[in-house]
Image (cartoon, rainbow, N blue to C red):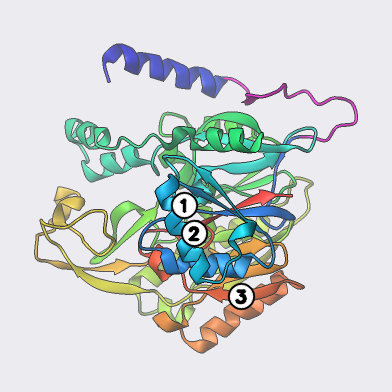
């Protein structure tokens, strides 16, 4: 990018940051008797759930589709005709009724379709899409962390990311005939947690990493201009096993994540009930990653217990037990293929960490019981008993979810393959409101 283009980009961001959120399709002023625009919650009635497709996640996609179809219409956002054909074969193998599945194509479609768009309603109750800027999960911020103190290397690192998924949400809106609300902020859907009634829970470090050109006060002001948002509840940190891209968590423990998506550690079960990730305290006494999580969630708990919803009413906070930390040993190699979750290289880490090719590290899965999917009468719950979580821990988690989602069926799904690349069941689905 030349200097003139960069200056234009900076000016545009400053202008957008100073301006009120505006819809691309219509004026914000509601006609008499119309409702107010709003972002919808996952627990609201759903018209459809979208899925993505990627090689390597076929079994996971099949299981999600088979569990969801009895409850909600399925739609799939895939990159083209070849991927649609592959996806159809996968769903057919799971006895999914393909005549009831709608497909849409986008060359930049994400497997983790949750992050491609955020849905809401406009002032007439029609479907709307909130258009955030796309930054490939804060890639530039990761480059600065990867090359601390070396601006040239950080800039070169940033240039290597040529993803152009910034238009996927707008193209999806065109497909659906939905209004589009534009925001100056950068974020993915997995980092947007709302109760549908004006309250947004935000992970402060995550929003700062995505919007480093804005101050925290500017970020909050822009959040309060999102459709229907009247209060922002800031939390201090997400799960340790969800770092920004590939990074060290502590010691030999490393992870591949989003930098703190809320759908990994805090979720609304209804407009006033909040589920907060809670590590097993016995595990936290012996495992360094569980220790970090316990400290972080204790701080978040204190903030939630003091908070109110947009109407000033206190929240009901339930601690949802986390699974046991899931980890595997991987060796660092100069020949590592960075697209594969189990291949790691020493040059993926900042030089000051002193990693060497041939050394080994503990790779953490972004495993979380909070990455569940709510779709009308069902809740799809990640199951970690096959990955080291004791039955007592699993049963305690299920008991809290039954309390939070009384009247909905709980179904289990194994999401470990997605967890190794920082995703999960919620990440791989996108709720379209009814």
Q: Looking at the picture, how far across and down is residue 164, in whole percent?
A: 39, 34
Give percent across and percent down for residue 432: 65, 49
Q: In this view, does 248 lie to the left or right of 269?
A: left
Query: At 32% across and 61% down in the image, what residue appears?
Result: 255
Dot 3 lies on which element?
Answer: strand
Is residue 369 visible in this depiction of the protein?
Answer: no
Residue indicated by mark 1:
84
**Which is more foreground, mark 3 or mark 2?**
2
Magenta stretch prevailing secondary structure: loop
Please report the bounds of the magenta region as a residue range: 19-36
The residue under label 2 is 88
In this rendering, the answer to whether 281 lies above or below 331 is below
Q: Residue 411 carries which label?
A: 3
Which residue is most to the right? 33
> Disc 1 versus disc 3: distance between alpha carbons?
26 Å
Kind of element beneath mark 2: helix
Q: Nearer the viewer, residue 90 or 61?
A: 90
Q: What's the CA distance linking mark 3 and mark 2?
A: 23 Å
Asked whether disc 2 touches disc 1, contact meaning CB atoms under 8 Å apart, the reply is yes
């Amino acid at each position: 990018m030349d200097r003139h283009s960069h200056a234009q980009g900076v000016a545009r961001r400053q202008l957008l940051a100073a301006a009120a959120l505006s819809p691309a399709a219509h004026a914000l002023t509601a006609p008499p008797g119309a409702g107010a625009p709003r972002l919808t919650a996952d627990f609201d009635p759903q018209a459809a759930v979208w899925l993505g497709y990627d090689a390597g996640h076929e079994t996971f996609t099949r299981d999600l589709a088979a569990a969801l179809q009895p409850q909600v219409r399925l739609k799939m956002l895939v990159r083209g005709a070849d991927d649609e054909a592959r996806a159809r074969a996968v769903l057919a193998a799971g006895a999914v009724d393909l005549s009831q599945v709608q497909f849409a194509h986008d060359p930049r479609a994400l497997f983790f379709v949750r992050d491609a768009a955020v849905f809401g309603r406009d002032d007439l109750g029609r479907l709307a899409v909130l258009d955030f800027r796309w930054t490939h999960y804060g890639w530039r911020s990761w480059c600065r962390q990867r090359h601390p103190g070396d601006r040239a290397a950080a800039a070169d690192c940033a240039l290597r990311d040529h993803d152009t998924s910034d238009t996927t949400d707008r193209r999806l809106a065109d497909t659906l005939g939905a209004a589009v609300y534009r925001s100056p902020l950068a974020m993915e859907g997995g980092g947007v947690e709302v109760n549908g009634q004006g309250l947004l829970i935000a992970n402060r470090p995550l929003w700062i990493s995505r919007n480093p050109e804005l101050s925290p006060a500017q970020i909050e002001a822009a959040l309060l201009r999102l459709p229907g948002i009247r209060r922002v509840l800031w939390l201090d940190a997400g799960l340790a096993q969800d770092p920004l891209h590939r990074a060290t968590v502590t010691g030999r423990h490393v992870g591949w994540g989003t930098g703190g998506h809320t759908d990994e550690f805090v979720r609304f079960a209804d407009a006033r009930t909040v589920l907060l990730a809670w590590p097993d305290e016995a595990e936290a006494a012996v495992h360094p990653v569980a220790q970090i999580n316990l400290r972080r969630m204790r701080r978040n708990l204190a903030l939630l217990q003091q908070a109110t919803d947009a109407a000033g009413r206190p929240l009901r906070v339930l601690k949802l037990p986390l699974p046991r930390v899931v980890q595997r040993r991987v060796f660092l190699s100069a020949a590592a293929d960075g697209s594969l979750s189990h291949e790691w290289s020493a040059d993926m880490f900042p030089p000051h960490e002193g990693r060497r090719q041939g050394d080994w590290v503990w790779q953490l899965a972004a495993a979380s019981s909070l990455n569940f999917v709510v779709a009308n009468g069902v809740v799809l719950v990640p199951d970690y008993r096959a990955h080291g979580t004791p039955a007592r821990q699993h049963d305690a988690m299920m008991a809290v979810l039954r309390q939070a989602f009384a009247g909905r069926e709980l179904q289990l799904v194994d999401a470990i393959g997605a967890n190794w690349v920082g995703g999960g069941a919620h990440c791989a689905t996108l709720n379209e409101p009814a």
